[in-house]
Amino acid sequence: MENAKEELVKKIESARVVLNKSIDEKRRYEEIYKNSVDLDSLIEQYIEAGY
């Protein structure tokens, strides 16, 4: 179970980096939005798992 939490945290951190990079590089709205939705989905999984 701890492995699953650590893996999810790594995915969240990675998704945050991708989102921030896309914002910093002034990417297209659609790309930034997708990256934001991806991050939100991972955070939702984290919350639902009760970590």
Image: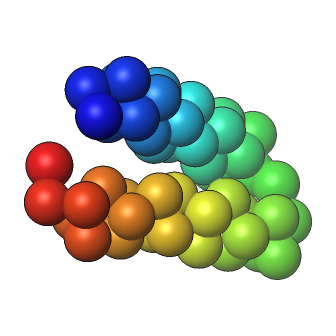
Q: Nearer the viewer, residue 17 or 14?
A: 14
Which residue is located at x 39 percent, y 64 percent?
45
Which residue is located at x 26 percent, y 70 percent?
48
Image quarter for residue 29?
A: bottom right
* Residue 47 visible somewhere in the drawing: yes
Of all residues, the one furthest to the left in this rendering is 50
- Answer with left or right where residue 20 lies relative to residue 34: left
Q: Nearer the viewer, residue 49 or 40?
A: 49
Above or below, comparing residue 17 to residue 15 in the picture = above
Q: Position of residue 4 (x, y in %)?
A: 40, 35
Q: Nearer the viewer, residue 4 or 31?
A: 4
Of all residues, the one furthest to the front in this rendering is 1
Above or below, comparing residue 7 to residue 37 in the picture = above
Q: Position of residue 22 (x, y in %)?
A: 71, 46
* Residue 13 visible somewhere in the drawing: no
Image quarter of the N terminus: top left
Above or below, comparing residue 8 to residue 6 in the picture = below
Q: Position of residue 11 (x, y in %)?
A: 53, 36
- Answer with left or right where residue 21 lies relative to residue 50: right
Which residue is located at x 14 percent, y 49 percent?
51
Q: How many marks?
A: 0
Image quarter for residue 38?
A: bottom right
Q: How is the image coloured?
A: rainbow
- Answer with left or right where residue 43 lies relative to residue 19: left
Which residue is located at x 73 percent, y 70 percent?
34
